[in-house]
Amino acid sequence: MLSSFKNDLQICVIGASGGIGRCLLKKLDNDQSVKSIYTFSRKEISPISNKVKTFHIDITSEDSVKKASSHITNQSIDLIVVATGILHDDGIVPEKRISDLNPMNMRKLYEVNTIGPAMIAKYFIPLLDSSEKSVFAVLSARVGSIKDNSLGGWTSYRASKAALNMIIKTISIETVRTIPNAIIVGLHPGTVDTNLSKPFQKNISKEKLFSPNYTVEKLLSVINNLEAKDSGGFFAWDGKQIDY
């Protein structure tokens, strides 16, 4: 599954209690090349095997993120996947027009979709293996592409993901100086049948609504095929690069 990496992989999954995160954890657990999986989530999850270690994280708290990273000692991590994000919540719905903008809701989206992954990068990227291929991959969204925005709406979510994409690009430029084999990327999973997309599925055709299992298989394939030149890029589930 991850044949372009070395064997005995050490992997981190952040956001392991979400729809994509849970499925990713199961897939990696069944991969014989994976030695250890460190999982981090706000909600408690049960370990599914001896190679899975579970820890708490609140990505909206820098102290929590820092403490979470400290659980990994004397290890060189090969792959970090950040499968966190928010589109809607109690009282938060994507805006249809600019008059719907709410400062409190905007702050929440930035806190989870932008600042959280940035803090994870701050404390977890230094744990990446410096001698072999390693990847830091963050789930973003195609609607965060400024060039691809032809419909408008969803202002806060789009902006939080666009800012995330800029953070990924910026961090990739810095990281190559200290961890030359590291690849830092954003990934668009498509529209996945999870709680995040539930309220917006009625206008999605069946062939464009992916199961978490299908999405995870595709994303792992994209990760496996990444090369050093791809660092800083933004890639869809099918491997195609998306313009920022």
Image (spheres, rainbow, N blue to C red):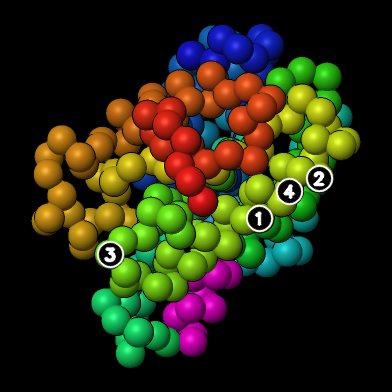
Give the left or right position of residue 127, taking residue 138 as reference.
right
Q: Which quadrant of the figure has residue 226? A: top right
Label 3: state its secondary structure.
Answer: loop
> Residue tagged by mark 1?
167
Residue 151 in view (yes/no): yes
The image shows residue 137, relative to residue 169, as above or below, that is above
The residue lying toward the viewer, choosing from 172 and 127, is 172
Q: Which quadrant of the figure has residue 167? A: bottom right
Residue 80 location, x and y as percent? 63, 36
> Rounded to the nearest whole Å, what is the CA distance between mark 3 and mark 1?
24 Å
| Residue at 64% in and 49% down | 168
> Rounded to the nearest whole Å, what is the CA distance between mark 2 and mark 4?
5 Å
> Residue tagged by mark 3?
151
Point out which mark residue 171 bears: 4
Dot 3 or dot 1, earlier in sequence: 3
Label 2: state its secondary structure.
Answer: helix
| Residue at 40% in and 73% down | 155
The image shows residue 30, relative to residue 77, as above or below, that is above
* Type of amino acid at the residue the image marks with label 4: Ile
> Rounded to the nearest whole Å, what is the CA distance between mark 2 and mark 1?
11 Å
